[in-house]
Amino acid sequence: MRILVIQQKRIGDVLTSTIICNNLKKQFPLYTIDYMCYTNSVDVLIDNPNIDTVIPLSHKARKNYFSLFKFIFKIRAKKYDVVIDVYNKLETNLITMFAGSNIKIAYHKWYTSLFYTHNLKRFENTETPKYGFAIDNRLLLLEPLNLDQNKIDPYPKLFVSPEEDEKTISLFEKHNINRDKKTIMISLLGSEKNKTYPLEYMTKVVEYAASHKDVTILFNYFENQIEDAKKIYNSCSKETQEKIHFDLFGKDLRSFIAIMNQCDMIIGNDGGAINMAKALNKPAFTIFSPFVEKKIWATFEDGLRYISVHLKDFRPELFGDNINHSEIKKNSASLYQLLSPELFKNKIDFFINNN
């Protein structure tokens, strides 16, 4: 049996959807499980033993229909028995339609019966998630394949090689990181401006973390975000700056993963960094943007190792039934200002003290 799992989009989405591959390989070890994603997310799949082949869909292949159909016929030649399309957009509708598979699984949309044999309705937001809807809805896509539900493992996983660990341990030694102290990664900035906690507020979050005895702080940011990262660093007190190793950061995805694997926990903006930390079994404190649905991405919330905050937790009246998602996203900057760090300082303190 040959199965293709398709998940385009961002790193967090690609990593989360690996639970489909993990569970398929766990219960059907002789099946071939391939995974299609965009090229910028391939690094979170490295060394995953549950994926036989990673198939990157490049920007070049996507930019015109001739290139896309050339790619599609390469997929068709692999003769997959099953396609599981987690992304479910026009691009992947076409890939699935021409793949020639007998079983084609995706989420229900009004038109999807044209492309798929199984169209599954996502959990409604009025329902209570089991693991977080980002997890629950992906596990839903496995139902047509009749897996043993008692053997389902809902946790995404990242795999770090011994060589990567050794290199990072040496890097920590070079930067004089005291391993007797808690090492806290701060995810300073989101992937987009409207997913980034206001810088002046994030400065306070860093100060809260640094106020704890025997902690070391690392910053996570992209090189093109260094100016905003410096603003936060320069706004911190001298005592806090002494606990921050500003220049020790992951310059690419694999180096961030290896560094995160040596940290004790992560605090910061919702996004790929939080998802990767969880996949490394690290405690995570997540600050959600007002326009992100907490029920979807607040995965494995237990009030101890995994804690998150959202403006809706404190000001639910701002998120009534008559306010749509696009309106919230449009006003995310002003709404973010209402989520002052003083509202959840006690939660951060609890999180650090208990992990």
Image (spheres, helix red, strand yellow):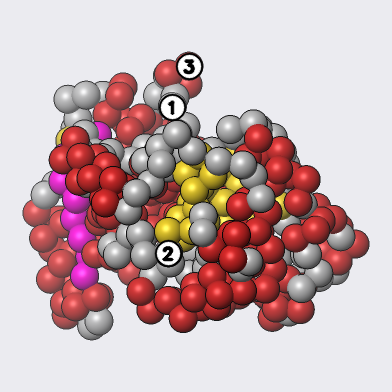
In front of the other: 76 or 41 = 41
Q: Is residue 27 left or right of residue 181?
A: left
In front of the other: 330 or 176 = 176
Q: Quadrant of residue 32?
A: top left
Q: Earlier in the sequence, mark 3 or mark 2?
A: 3
> Which mark identifies residue 246?
2
Q: What is the secondary structure assignment of the residue under circle 2?
A: loop
* Residue assigned mark 3: 150
Q: Residues within 10 Å of mark 1 (few under 14, many from 20)?
A: few
Q: In this orientation, does residue 59 appear?
A: yes
Q: Residues within 10 Å of mark 3 (few under 14, many from 20)?
A: few
Q: Is residue 346 left or right of residue 244?
A: right
Q: Which dot, 1 or 3, sits closer to the camera?
A: 1
> Which mark identifies residue 11?
none
Q: How many angstroms separate mark 3 from mark 2 (CA)? A: 45 Å
* Residue assigned mark 1: 153
Q: Position of residue 348 (x, y in %)?
A: 69, 46
What's under tag 2, amino acid-wise?
Phe
Does 261 appear above or below 342?
Answer: above
Magenta segment boundaries in residue numbering: 50-58
